[in-house]
Image (tube, coloured by chain):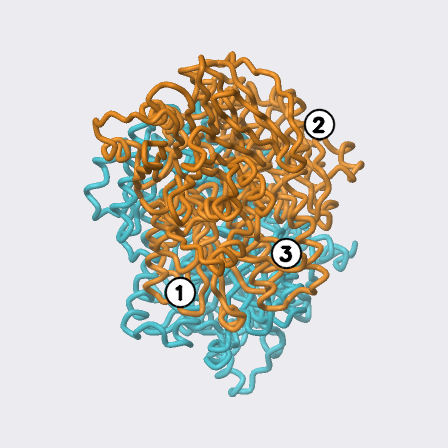
Chain colours: A cyan, B orange
Amino acid sequence: MCGIVGYFGEKSAVPILVEGLRKLEYRGYDSSGIAVMEEGGIRITKSVGKLVNLEEKLGNRTYNARIGIGHTRWATHGRPSDVNAHPHMDCHGDFAVVHNGIIENYLELREWLTAEGHLFRSETDTEVLAHLVEHFYKGDLQDAVKKMLAKVEGSYAVVVLSYKNPDVMVAARKDSPLIVGIGDGEYFVASDIPAVLKYTRKTYIMEDGEMVTVSAEGLKFSDFTTGECVEKSVFEVTWDAVAAEKGGYEHFMLKEIFEQPKALRDTLAGRLNHDHVVLQEVDLTPKEVALFNKVAIVACGTAYHAGLIGKGLIEHWAKIPVEVDIASEFRYRAPLIDDKTLVVVISQSGETADTLAALRESKKKGARVIAITNVVGSSVAREAHDVIHTWAGPEIAVASTKAYTTQIEGMILLALYLTQAKGTMPKEWITEIISELGKIPDKAEIILKEGAERIKTLARYFEEVGSAFFIGRGLDWAVAQEGSLKLKEISYIHAEAYASGELKHGTLALITEDTPIIALATQRDLYEKTVSNVIEVKARDAKVIGFTFEGNTDFHKSVNEIFYIPETVNELAPLLTVIPLQLLSYYVSVARGNDVDKPRNLAKSVTVE
Amino acid sequence: MCGIVGYFGEKSAVPILVEGLRKLEYRGYDSSGIAVMEEGGIRITKSVGKLVNLEEKLGNRTYNARIGIGHTRWATHGRPSDVNAHPHMDCHGDFAVVHNGIIENYLELREWLTAEGHLFRSETDTEVLAHLVEHFYKGDLQDAVKKMLAKVEGSYAVVVLSYKNPDVMVAARKDSPLIVGIGDGEYFVASDIPAVLKYTRKTYIMEDGEMVTVSAEGLKFSDFTTGECVEKSVFEVTWDAVAAEKGGYEHFMLKEIFEQPKALRDTLAGRLNHDHVVLQEVDLTPKEVALFNKVAIVACGTAYHAGLIGKGLIEHWAKIPVEVDIASEFRYRAPLIDDKTLVVVISQSGETADTLAALRESKKKGARVIAITNVVGSSVAREAHDVIHTWAGPEIAVASTKAYTTQIEGMILLALYLTQAKGTMPKEWITEIISELGKIPDKAEIILKEGAERIKTLARYFEEVGSAFFIGRGLDWAVAQEGSLKLKEISYIHAEAYASGELKHGTLALITEDTPIIALATQRDLYEKTVSNVIEVKARDAKVIGFTFEGNTDFHKSVNEIFYIPETVNELAPLLTVIPLQLLSYYVSVARGNDVDKPRNLAKSVTVE
């Protein structure tokens, strides 16, 4: 989720690192830093805020260092600050580390290292890596990094420098991108291609489980588990700078849709145990949970739709009544909130003005407030009593995709947390849900791999239309609302979602053969009812595209087109169902020639009322 | 709300009465009956159900009577049954009465008459009229009716026969229509012109406070308060039969929109006291009200929108948390309902399948259920623990208008009832709201009289468009939802309502110069915020039509067109604001050449899921 760049060569490293970081700026960040190998030791410069702050600190001085690493941070563990910015060092300043990803067992490692006498300075998970390398270092940096990696669980792209081996740079990856660029007698390491594109188009793309040692002798790739050497072939980058920022995708939105398996995996990382969930950032005793007589979920736009799913799950599992409100309405309706209310605010940016105001109002009334947000250190994250972070990484496209699915995960985790505190569902059942939840990221991957082309062909139903309806019941209705908002935002088609059973109370008048209908039918207990509603719209000659589980081989008879979703339990279906709907909006928008990433009239983060 | 017909002449009365009643069948009814003057006494035949049931009872016999009265009933006081059907008689069968309207002080009169020794047979308010005439009769029927009228409060069109004056028929009206048709040596009395159109086009339209005595000598009109004679001129009906059914309006919907002042008045009748409301059909002690920890409102379509307003008022006034659910969703989401929940179901017809199922489910879970319905004796009315009837009268157009505004009144009355039980608002404040509420029917009349032409001109903004948005905050948002549904139903324009503050979270992408926006800005505390949102859409060149209170002379600067609503308190604004929106849908639908009363794909009462 952060940006990494490393330089090893004969030129002055600092300007190259800063330039590389600037190319990663489109990802957004909250702090940045560099470490360069100088006479007398590693020199570190870090600064909270935008890159320009770091540049100011660096000033106009000339730097002699020829080797260095840099990092732009998108905070996960630890709020944005100078001290939490990368690179991180060991106790004695001999080792410097930059890292993308999440170290899941960092708390455990930190305790152990602290007991061993290591002194920690930051709140990050990354710092354990520096101390681990220090711990294992016996004269060979590559060996120490290898031993360090054997200890850690999680995802990472990591680059390490050591003043004790000043002519070597070691990097490794697992579940977080990393590339090596080959210049003329110089090497670049980076999380993303744009960082190196100014200097070279010749790269090696590192694979999971690989490490590389960069030295004057050249590059040495190896498998860090077995230690065996790895032969790699050069990848010649043919993208221009703009395409490179999008990782080869045509638009950020498509890139972010495809990032969902990783975002979903990261958000679950370290939070699922065999028979219970762990939310380290939420501090509620079962006694406190028992005192809540209401949950009030408050959000705007897409986040509000994640809240609708939260309502379904919390009421169903934890048996606590839930209200979901649009933040701009909640603020002004004098809601009945007190110290027996658990308020949950959801905001990707953590800066949504109405949501923030709702949070403050709720605190004033004595409510306990949990935030679900994608930005560590955001206003919402700082001001809430507890936070559930989504680990979606920076979202650049205005139309939210990976933020939404990870917000749903946040709601599922919270619902399970409340349920286990209240003991309202049997343990075996929680075990079952957790097991199914763990499989969701892989299933999302299957949809993207196998379904994208199919959705592209379905997009033709929408090329000429002015209106479309999304229908479903229960959780499908909640997903329908998000699906229709996506289509609105980027295709400019007037799409609207309806609870299937409500169509005949008026809206059916709008249904003609020119109105495509998206019918969601994943909820098994509501399936027959949904089919009846589909037959109603089919009777008006509407074209119906159905979405249901693979096992449901009946539904295709009722619809014009069908898209199958991998099987999961009813309650988790939204995490999968929405993905083809996101793709659909995307392909329709492209077909209609719209600016997908920057739809007209809209801004990414709404910090005004 | 019922249908009345009377015959006085030389022909056989029974077939003429039956034929007249058939012409009133379009109004819907639940029972019917006739009374004819025969040798030996007045003969009454009544039957619950459709007119055909009455006809069966009458059989093929020939009747000699030349004078008679008939009635088709739309139940108000007392469920539909043989005994509650009109005509009603006194103790000895000497007087027969048919009546439309509501006698507000009937309980008090009934107690007094019972104490006087009168024996009541039915549950109706009408029966007191027969006993009152009996009480006052001293040999002159006209005099007895006059004295009876002096005693009663409420609205009525009434026709009386007496075996003691067998050659006279007396009729009177106040706030309920009544006409007299003049044939060749014969006279007809009727609530509506269609009942007499087969026989004559010459009529007298009776005015409030007038009575007429029909005898062989002719007609004698007088003012029943002063006793003075009244000169009337003949009204020649130029309408055809179809237009006559619509009371001269082009469509039932328009007729029903214009019936709202009366429907609003009738629904409040007898329920407003100086400083408290009276709901005779609701039987809750303050102690029982105090035990409710939640109100769950369940309805479909337009009735659901009335529920949204109920939520705002009950939470704001009575401080009880309220959930509003679409019935088809409520049923299947295993709602958290128990004996501490007050469930309110709303259904015009009282037969809406999903709403009825929700009612049954709620009762099973131990909840107390109050129904708000327009049909006495409907399934919902029968099965609920308590009922608040709306007195809108039969609604024939598929698009609901007067049912909606009276449902809002029902919600207001219930909110006040709960508030006075809980003592959550000061008495002076309740007095103020009740006083304002009493003025609403007159203000509705002003809008219809002075605003209809203006709305007709505004309709041109919608003639060519495919999409439109309705925006507002708080209660304005609830009304916006109803306004947009109306436009959808009959104009087939894809209209959608948005909470103003939510537009920028996606939907703003749809706003262009071709998208008309209806902006509601009646809620004084939210006015500034709404203006900001209007400016956002104006910046996208949208055409904005604003609706606000007369006193707000600022709003016209922010919008393209403005419509002013008579001032009232914030909470009662929905009752008025929706009326121009109904008119707008109507005129747009007419301009687009649609079938206003029977929009495509829709049915009036949804008795299937």
Q: Nearer the viewer, mark 3 or mark 1?
A: 3
The local crowd at label 2, few if under 14, some if 14 to 19, many if 20 or more residues have their Cα within 10 Å, is some
Marked residue nearer the N-terminal end (1 or 2): 1
- Left or right of B188: which side holds B572? right
Q: Secondary structure at mark 2?
A: strand
Q: Label 2, label 3: how many angstroms apart (C-alpha)?
A: 39 Å
Q: Amino acid at mark 2?
A: Glu
Q: For mark 2, what is the residue?
A: B561
Please state if A211 lies on the left or on the right of B524 as rendered: left
- Residue A419 figure quarter: bottom left
- Residue type at mark 1 is Ala
Q: Name the chain letter of the residue that bears numbered label 2.
A: B
Residue at the disc numbered 3: B273
Packing grade of label 3 (10 A; few <14, some 14-19, many >=20) is few
Look at mark 1 in the image and give the residue it sits on.
Answer: B367
Q: Position of residue A461 (x, y in %)?
A: 37, 27
Q: Are marks 3 and 1 on the same chain?
A: yes
- Does residue A586 show up? no
